[in-house]
Image (spheres, rainbow, N blue to C red):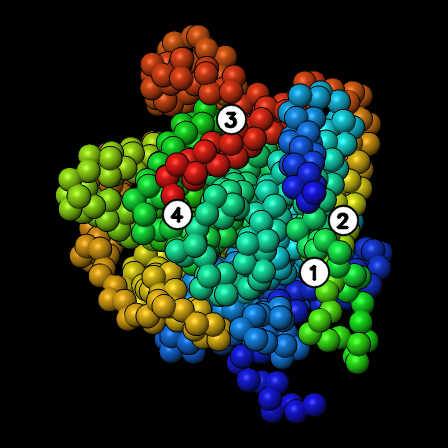
């Protein structure tokens, strides 16, 4: 049931959007961004999955026409995406810490010096 | 290794990207200890950044000959892993005239801004780290426009977003810098996620990430999943281009970032988003021929133009005002080839704003005034930029705006569609409002009376004036000789956008699209030299009248300048509306429009949740529109 994965991944993406839009705590915003990322990662890995496929690890002689394995490219893409997601979290958390120092609050409704 | 082979111009695109990342690496590896020289706290690292950007620009200039004039499309497979069994198995760079056009713009802006940075960043700490991020940002954008692989485009988008966010927050003590960076990061991250989702949905459909191969497969096989992917990709690149509804992020980021970075955000980051949208619509999905797609882009372009120019009129901060103008002009870019001129004059204006900030320490329009006496060169350079952006002949803004008016009017006449006529009107109105707001800026910053606290202001150092001078010279030259610029740069780019067939075949993929020869019809006859003469005569006449009338030079300084600054234009009314001062030059206009301004001010609330909501709504609307329209 790979469709279930697709539904779940879009559910996670939308959940991430929902968190970012409705939560007024900066840390929760960062969590929302991470959830959104995980949704996309799940989508990528599900797209590369072939039911019943083996791991795509072969040495030169082993690979034949009959080999049946999962698509390795999405896995590489997921790794890249995970690394980028970790960077996003690290960077946004460091910004949150600095903002808490200078604004004294984590409420997004109070962090709005720039507007209009 | 064969060294003769290394000077082959086919390698130049990868060199151009590599030198920037290599520069970032060397600067980072050399440690963060500031140098003793007070005029250059980064020491040799600034020179490394300068050399890297200059080398990158040189490599790209060397490509003008084969790509722009020769019409070649350079396909460069990394590690010579090309196509196997009809599928792209390697990662490619693909440089056609459109890529090179954007790459040249970017490299020029990056180089000029690096020249400017050396003296501009003297008051800051951590300047070595600044250059690391600077080179990363430049490399990321260049990698994005030269890439021939859609996943690589995503990675480059992430690199440039990170670098841009970090640089926006670089001056952490600046009012609102952290906040601007965080908002940019949240919405930018949503955009990147949208791009990645679009990329992976395309991969699921076509099992390839190569742009040329996708372009050969997608047209004709559009299904709902492809349309969904298109909507995701479109919104993702929109966040990078800051077009409506993502414009508040740009205003925040511009206001907080150092001026040298504002230049990059305005001239480089927005261009990368525009490039992404053009790559999608002209090449990947080839939806540009569809009337509904054109309608959407022209509609969004017109809305961006109008909304942002009116938002700009209500600003008090020099850089925020410029930022809204920048996005307003991006509206023109979406509608047509205004991109090059935009980078030049917008870069110039931001550098001038940076020069003012550098000397006075503020960008508040209410506090500044009369700087033309203290900073004559900056004033002249700023005026060149202001004339260009307002579309005053004979500067470069006019040439491209003229083409937009003509093209949209011609389209209205040809198709009998009243909508295109409306675009012409909006474009003209926007241009007028732009001029109006630059009259206000030059009045409040460079003319009028000098506040007492700025009596000791000096002209900016030579390095900064040099950078502004380069851009001003380019503005004038491209304005005076639009034909040669068109022949050299914009015409090949326009041809490339129409010539998808050769883009696909030169990469080694089959396509049913023929490699067509496009004849490029220049829109309208436009002789700038005559206009230059008229301008000179008009200036001469004004000077004579001013001298003959014993024009009284007001030179006393006063501390109460805030009230008397607009004396010439002052209507005597009270400040009835908090956003619009009674002494404002355009008080009457704003008073009549106060409900609109009030509404817009409430809408741009500054709460990150609202901007995220706009992004989600835009994504939903884009998905619905694509499903129905395509």
The chain under label 1 reads A
Mark nearest the camera among 1 and 3 is 1
Q: Which residue is pictured at 66% across the width and 69% down the height?
A: B18
Quadrant location, the C terminus of chain B: top left
* Residue B409 occupies quadrant: top left
Labels 3 and 4 touching (C-beta < 8 A): no
> In terms of secondary structure, where does tag 3 sit?
loop
**Where does label 2 land, which residue?**
A82
**Where does label 4 land, which residue?**
B333
At label 3, counting other C-alpha atoms closer than 10 Å, the crowd grade (few under 14, some 14-19, many 20 or more) is some
Q: Earlier in the sequence, mark 1 or mark 2?
A: 1
> In terms of secondary structure, where does tag 1 sit?
loop
The chain under label 3 reads B
Mark nearest the camera among 1 and 2 is 1
Residue B225 appears left or right of B588: right
Mark nearest the camera among 2 and 4 is 2
Mark nearest the camera among 3 and 4 is 4
Residue B260 shows up from this direction: no
């Amino acid at each position: 049931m790979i469709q279930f994965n697709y539904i779940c991944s879009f559910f996670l993406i939308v959940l991430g959007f929902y968190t970012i839009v409705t939560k007024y705590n900066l840390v929760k915003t960062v969590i929302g961004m991470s959830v959104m990322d995980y949704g996309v990662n799940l989508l990528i890995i599900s797209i590369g999955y072939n039911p019943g496929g083996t791991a795509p690890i072969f040495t030169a002689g082993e690979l034949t026409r009959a080999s049946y394995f999962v698509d390795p490219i999405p896995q590489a893409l997921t790794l890249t995406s995970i690394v980028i997601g970790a960077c996003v979290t690290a960077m946004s958390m460091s910004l949150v810490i600095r903002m808490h120092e200078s604004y004294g609050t984590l409420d997004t409704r109070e962090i709005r010096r720039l507007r209009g | 290794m064969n060294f003769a082979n290394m000077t082959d111009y086919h390698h130049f695109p990868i060199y151009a990207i590599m030198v920037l990342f290599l520069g970032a690496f060397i600067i980072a590896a050399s440690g963060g200890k500031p140098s003793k020289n007070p005029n250059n706290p980064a020491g040799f690292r600034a020179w490394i950044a300068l050399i890297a950007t200059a080398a990158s620009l040189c490599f790209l200039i060397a490509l003008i000959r084969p790509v722009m004039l020769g019409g070649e499309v350079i396909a460069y497979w990394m590690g010579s892993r090309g196509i196997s069994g009809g599928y792209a198995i390697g990662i490619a760079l693909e440089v056609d005239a459109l890529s090179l056009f954007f790459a040249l713009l970017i490299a020029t802006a990056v180089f000029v801004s690096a020249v400017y940075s050396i003296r501009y960043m003297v008051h800051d700490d951590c300047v070595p780290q600044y250059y690391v991020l600077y080179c990363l940002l430049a490399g990321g954008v260049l990698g994005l426009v030269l890439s021939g692989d859609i996943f690589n485009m995503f990675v480059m988008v992430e690199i440039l977003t990170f670098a841009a966010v970090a640089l926006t927050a670089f001056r952490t003590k600046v009012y609102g810098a952290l906040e601007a960076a965080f908002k940019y990061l949240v919405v930018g991250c949503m955009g990147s996620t949208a791009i990645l989702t679009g990329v992976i949905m395309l991969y699921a459909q076509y099992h390839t990430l190569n742009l040329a191969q996708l372009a050969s497969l997608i047209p004709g096989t559009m299904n709902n999943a492809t349309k969904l992917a298109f909507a995701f990709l479109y919104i993702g690149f929109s966040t990078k281009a800051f077009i409506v509804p993502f414009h508040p992020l740009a205003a925040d980021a511009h206001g907080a970032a150092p001026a040298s970075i504002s230049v990059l955000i305005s001239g480089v980051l927005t261009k990368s988003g525009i490039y992404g949208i053009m790559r999608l619509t002209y090449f990947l999905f080839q939806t540009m021929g569809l009337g509904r797609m054109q309608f959407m882009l022209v509609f969004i372009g017109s809305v961006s133009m109008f909304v942002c120019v009116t938002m700009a009129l209500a600003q008090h901060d020099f850089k925020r005002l410029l930022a809204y103008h920048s996005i307003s002009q991006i509206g023109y870019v979406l509608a047509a080839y205004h991109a090059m001129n935009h980078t030049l004059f917008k870069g110039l204006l931001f550098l001038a704003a940076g020069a003012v900030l550098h000397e006075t320490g503020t960008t508040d329009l209410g506090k500044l005034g009369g700087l033309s006496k203290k900073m004559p060169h900056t004033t002249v350079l700023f005026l060149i930029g202001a004339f260009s952006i307002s579309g005053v002949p004979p500067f470069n803004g006019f040439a491209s705006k003229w083409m937009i008016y003509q093209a949209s009017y011609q389209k209205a006449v040809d198709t009998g569609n009243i909508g295109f006529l409306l675009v012409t009107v909006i474009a003209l109105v926007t241009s007028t409002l732009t001029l109006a707001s630059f009259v206000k800026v030059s009045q409040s910053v460079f003319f009028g009376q000098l506040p007492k606290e700025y009596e000791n202001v000096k002209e900016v150092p030579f390095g900064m004036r040099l950078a502004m001078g380069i851009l001003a010279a380019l503005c004038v030259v491209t304005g005076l000789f639009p034909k040669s610029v068109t022949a050299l740069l914009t015409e090949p780019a326009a041809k490339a956008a129409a010539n998808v067939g050769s883009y696909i075949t030169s990469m080694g993929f089959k396509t049913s699209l023929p490699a067509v020869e496009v004849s490029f019809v220049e829109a309208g006859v436009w002789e700038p030299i005559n206009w230059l003469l008229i301008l000179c005569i008009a200036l001469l006449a004004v000077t004579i009248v001013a001298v003959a009338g014993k024009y009284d030079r007001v030179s006393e300084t006063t501390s109460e300048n805030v009230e008397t600054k607009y004396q010439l234009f002052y209507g005597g009314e009270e400040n009835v509306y908090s956003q619009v001062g009674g002494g404002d030059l355009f008080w009457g206009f704003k008073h009549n429009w106060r409900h609109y301004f009030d509404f817009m001010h409430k809408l741009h609330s500054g709460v990150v949740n609202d901007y995220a909501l706009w992004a989600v709504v835009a994504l939903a609307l884009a998905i619905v529109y694509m499903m129905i329209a395509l």
